[in-house]
Amino acid sequence: MIIKLNDLKPIMSVDDAEVYEIIGLKTNTKCLSVAYAVVHPNEETKLHFHNFTEVYIIVKGKGIITLDDNSTLVEEKNIILINKKVKHKIKNVGNEDLEFYSVCSPAFNEKDTVLI
């Protein structure tokens, strides 16, 4: 299966990121999901945690990732491991869109996401 990112329509995720679902419920894949997320300049996602593991792969822009009580600058080519139940959010601190892949295992499920 080939999926073209340019053919996908964005949705607003529960944490307020603009998300393009690539692999997951739409493809009947339950073991993992892949999405492309965009956070616009001076915006941030809501603080939340999941009952699954998530990985961010930053492809463009700069941001501040908060994992529990620790905040760190992240940028292109950084990979962030977000373990199950770790509270997290990401803020765009640059002048361009912050873009990243979000990979979840098992697949993203809104009912396993808790806003704080």
Image: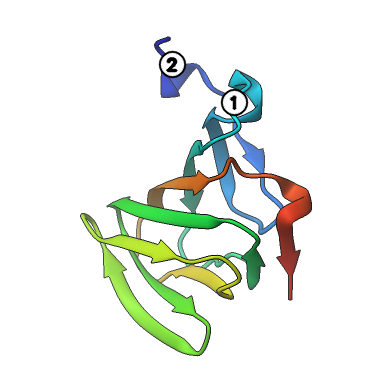
Q: Please give the residue where the numbered disc 2 appears in the rendered image.
A: 3
Q: Residue at x 38, y 63 (%)?
A: 81
Of 10 and 107, which appears nearest the observer?
A: 107
Across and down, in percent, residue 53 comes to: 51, 57
Q: Earlier in the sequence, mark 1 or mark 2?
A: 2
Of 101 and 24, which appears nearest the observer?
A: 24
Residue type highlighted by circle 1: Lys
Across and down, in percent, residue 50 comes to: 64, 61
Query: Position of 33 compared to 98: left or right?
Result: right
Name the secondary structure under disc 1: loop
Which quadrant would the C terminus be assigned to in this image?
A: bottom right
Query: Position of 110 compared to 55: left or right?
Result: right
Q: Which mark is residue 9?
A: 1
The image shows residue 98, relative to residue 24, as above or below, that is below
The image shows residue 51, relative to residue 102, as above or below, that is below
Q: Around disc 2, counting alpha carbons within 10 Å, would you say few (fewer than 14), some (14 to 19), or many (20 or more)?
A: few
Of 72 and 95, which appears nearest the observer?
A: 72
Q: Around disc 1, counting alpha carbons within 10 Å, would you say few (fewer than 14), some (14 to 19), or many (20 or more)?
A: few
Of 110 and 99, which appears nearest the observer?
A: 110
* Quarter where residue 6 is shown: top left
- Is residue 97 in view from this perspective? no
Query: Position of 94 compared to 33: left or right?
Result: left
The residue sitting at the right extreme is 111
The image shows residue 14, relative to residue 11, as above or below, that is below
